Image (cartoon, coloured by chain):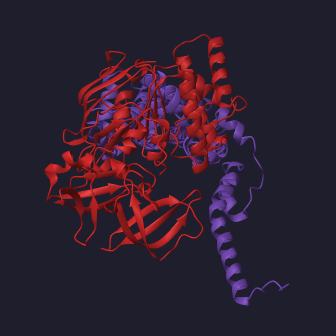
Chain colours: A red, B purple
Amino acid sequence: MAQVRLTDVAKVYDGKVRAVEDFSLTIDHGEFVVFVGPSGCGKSTTLRMIAGLEEITEGTIEIDGKVVNDVHPKNRDIAMVFQNYALYPHMSVFKNMAFGLTLRKLPREEIQQRVGEAAQMLGIDDLLHRKPKALSGGQRQRVALGRAIVREPKVFLFDEPLSNLDAKLRVTTRTEIKKLHQRLKTTTIYVTHDQEEAMTLGDRIVVMSAGRGVGRVEQVDTPLNVYRYPVNRFVGAFLGRTPMNFLPGRIERADSRLWFTRPGGLRLLMPEAYEEKLHPYVNQEVNLGFRPSALAEHPFPKYSEAGYTLPVHTVLIEPLGKNIDVSCRMQDGADILARIDARDDFPVNADITFYLDMDHVHVFEPGGFGINIIHADREAIAPAQPQHAAAGA
Amino acid sequence: MPAPAKPTSASVFARTALFIALVLIGITFVVPFVWQVLISLSTRTEVDLLTRLGFPPSLQPENYARVFTGGGVEDGGQLAQRVDFARYFFNSFFVAGWVTLLQVITSAMAAYAFSRVRWPGRDKVFLLYLGTMMIPGVVLMVPNFVIILGLGMFDNYTGLVIPAAFSAFGTFLLRQFMLTIPSSLDEAASIDGAGHWRIFTEVILPLARPGLIVLAIFTFLGNYNSFFWPLIITQSPNMRTLPIGLMAFDSSYGRETPLIMAASLMAMIPPIILFLFLQKYLVKGIQLGAVKG
């Protein structure tokens, strides 16, 4: 176990292309941190800098308090699992797993013991004599995991390890990785572009973006906090299996209350709790954001006034089992998606009224990275909260 | 069930014509070899008769032994120096073997540096090295000869081996081959604790084996058949290699055509065997089972 600390880390290629900027983060002993973001956001580059496979252009990386900027990968006491597994094709599974131990000149008995234990843990003990090409994708991934485990490193690094697996295997392997981490409690840094993987695996997740011309960190927090309280529109849009609904409009004052209004006539009352933060934005353009699951057919007790309703025309429904996704069109022509409790007689092609759970409504400044006016000043790393019933998306 | 389509007369004609054409082409390839065998079994005086008779009047299989014992002695004793054909064989194998070994080693190491190690100016240096392939070999003959002479390598094995131990072509071939090996393998190895030497010997070399074998075959055959450089860099008969040795049957003995044919037939055998055994490597690509497939 080890602590990993990144301070103002940046990566610049060829003196001009900035891949990562201002990356600062402290990863605690035994923590599982996931870097997530779209391609080009620098998440893999950052991981490779921690591994020592890329030079660090600016800033420092420490492992257990020791700056490792100029330390060769082999001396950093880390193990890495690659997207394409990177198994040595000419070596048996046993040799693949034992390679690092052999290079460290461990006694033969200990090598055999460690490889045997790891193989048993991963259920690959009957494959030890096989060559990688005689294994399935899932088995290869286990061997790659095993090769990392036997080393008993200070830090595990995972570079999109599941993206070459099919959907079903991906979910089961994901669970195994999480179990493995609970058992070994090794500090783990995991890179993925899949927000669901990030949400399910991480103790904390680091959401990164590429949209501003350089890879950078947008938000670091527990999965549920990032999901519930995105600091800006990018994070809100990136996380969640279904996209967040965004409605451009204005904040206006009427009848001594603040309203979100759209030119088409939509008026949404803003809860009093948000008024102080929204006050500076009166008569300004904003984006209202809410997840499909923040809509319901029945009023929320806290927000049952008329101002919290959203009249829509239902266009089509997609049954998902427990829920149904409803694609709707608002009177002013905007399309939104609602995820509500499933029922058989839900009317399609009808005018209905949805109620908004204002606890899960966000107001963003304009633009793709507009800050979340309501939640932007939250403590960055808040303690995880108990699972919320409405956060099912 | 429909009856199988009956071949039309046109297609039968086309197939027959093609067959005949292929047989004719085949014959043009085989005839010189058959002719060579026939000559090698004739006596020196009967070679001329062969063109009229089509077959030697008497078979002389002992020609093949005479290649080694130094033929031509009974033909008037013009023998200035004994032709030591076994020595030529040995020299050719010895020189081609060493050249192959050294060239594969140096090319593999250079290819590793040019493909797997990042250093400033790498690709420019590589292009420069590759550019040496543009210079015709004959242009380099004289300077090479002068250098080898100056180094005291004239007329011995080092002069035959050392200049051929480095090859831009071999480096290029293996570099291209190594570029196809995923870089994550060396990264995994370096995280596993391997330095460059370990990565080279335990990861890259085993995976580059098909490439190494192809280069070894090319190099061995090229040097086994090499004529001009051994001709100018050697002087004493016991340093001569096979292709030059064959010439000796011509110059030192008058014209010993049957012996030349017998000797060149025997000289052809090793490359053919080599090819038969290793041809699968010439066509077989690598199968990198570890990477997604």
Residue B183 in view of the camera: yes
Residue B235 in view of the camera: no
Count of marks, rendered view: 0
Residue A389 lies, in percent from the top left, at: 49, 46
Residue A231 lies, in percent from the top left, at: 29, 43
Taking B279 as reference, is A26 above or below it? above
Q: In the current view of this chain or complex, which residue is farthest to the right? A: B1
Using residue A239 as the reference point, say whether residue A98 is left or right of it. right
Using residue A59 as the reference point, say whether residue B186 is left or right of it. right
Residue B26 lies, in percent from the top left, at: 66, 65
**In percent of the image, x 64 and y 45: which residue is there?**
B272
Q: Nearer the viewer, residue A365 or B78?
A: A365
**In percent of the image, x 69 and y 37: which residue is there?**
B66
Taking A250 as reference, is B271 above or below it? above
Taking A368 as reference, is A51 above or below it? above
**In percent of the image, x 52 and y 73: which residue is there?**
A347
Using residue B54 as the reference point, say whether residue A35 is left or right of it. left
Q: Nearer the viewer, residue B281 or A24?
A: A24
Answer with the quarter of the image where residue A260 lies: bottom left
Q: Nearer the viewer, residue A6 or A331?
A: A331
Q: Nearer the viewer, residue B66 or B218?
A: B218
Residue A138 lies, in percent from the top left, at: 62, 41
Answer with the quarter of the image where residue A309 lies: bottom left
Q: In the current view of this chain or complex, which residue is farthest to the top? A: A107
Locate the N terminus of chain B and report the quarter of the image it occupies: bottom right
Using residue B130 as the reference point, say whether residue A283 is left or right of it. left
